Amino acid sequence: MPLNIPNLLTWARIVLIPLVIGAYFLPLPVHEQNFIATTAFVVAAVTDWFDGWLARKLRQTSAFGEFLDPVADKLMVAAALVILVQLDRIGAVVAFIIVGREIAISALREWMARLGATRSVAVSFVGKLKTTAQMIAIPLLLYHDDLFCLPVAALGFWLVWIAALLTLWSMGYYLGKAWPEILSRTR
């Protein structure tokens, strides 16, 4: 494992997961718990963008970094969704749609890589929209309190449902792209 700045940022994202979850077990008022969890999640989201940018800019890409980065992303999102279900801020169905899609598409990408057909399931525009929607919705739902007269919890609620719909759409897109390869391998 190359020890470089992009990989350290990815590891930092993983280390922030217990803070997002643990904030809600601290003996603090709920609004302070929300603030700590939201801040940790936002820092993690920023490092996600920043580590990829740095890896390309500094030419420090590595096979390990390419493996660890999406794992860190999925762990952070799954942890936040689980805590949001526990806090009754989202339903289990939404969390399952998002986490289930991540597992299914990760498995599909791994299988396609083994077949040498990685390009057919490369990240798409709808996948990027899905990620953007959920990375905005989750901090809104973690923060939960109104901010500058904005109904943060309501915005987060609608945006997470939009993210769930984009999640299903992107899963269909990736499965459609992989379908010819799947058919040719199962005959």
Image (cartoon, rainbow, N blue to C red):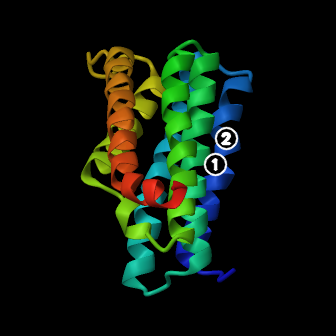
Badge 2: few (under 14), some or many (20 or more) residues near its Cα, within 10 Å? some
Horizontal relation, residue 88 to residue 146: left or right: right
Q: Position of residue 183 (x, y in %)?
A: 44, 54
The amino acid type of the residue labelled 1 equals: Leu
> Is residue 154 shown above or below 166?
above
Between residues 32 and 150, which one lies in front from this camera angle? 150
Please identify the residue farthest to the front as the structure is shown: 187
Query: In the rendered image, which residue does mark 2 sit on?
Result: 19
Q: Residue at x 34, y 48 (%)?
A: 176
> Is residue 180 shown above or below 131?
below
Is residue 122 visible in the rendered image? The answer is no
Query: In the rendered image, which residue does mark 1 sit on?
Result: 16
Distance between mark 2 and mark 1 Cα atoms? 5 Å
Q: Tell me, for residue 184, which label it has, or none.
A: none
Q: Position of residue 131 (x, y in %)?
A: 37, 45
Q: Residue at x 42, y 85 (%)?
A: 58
SS under mark 1: helix
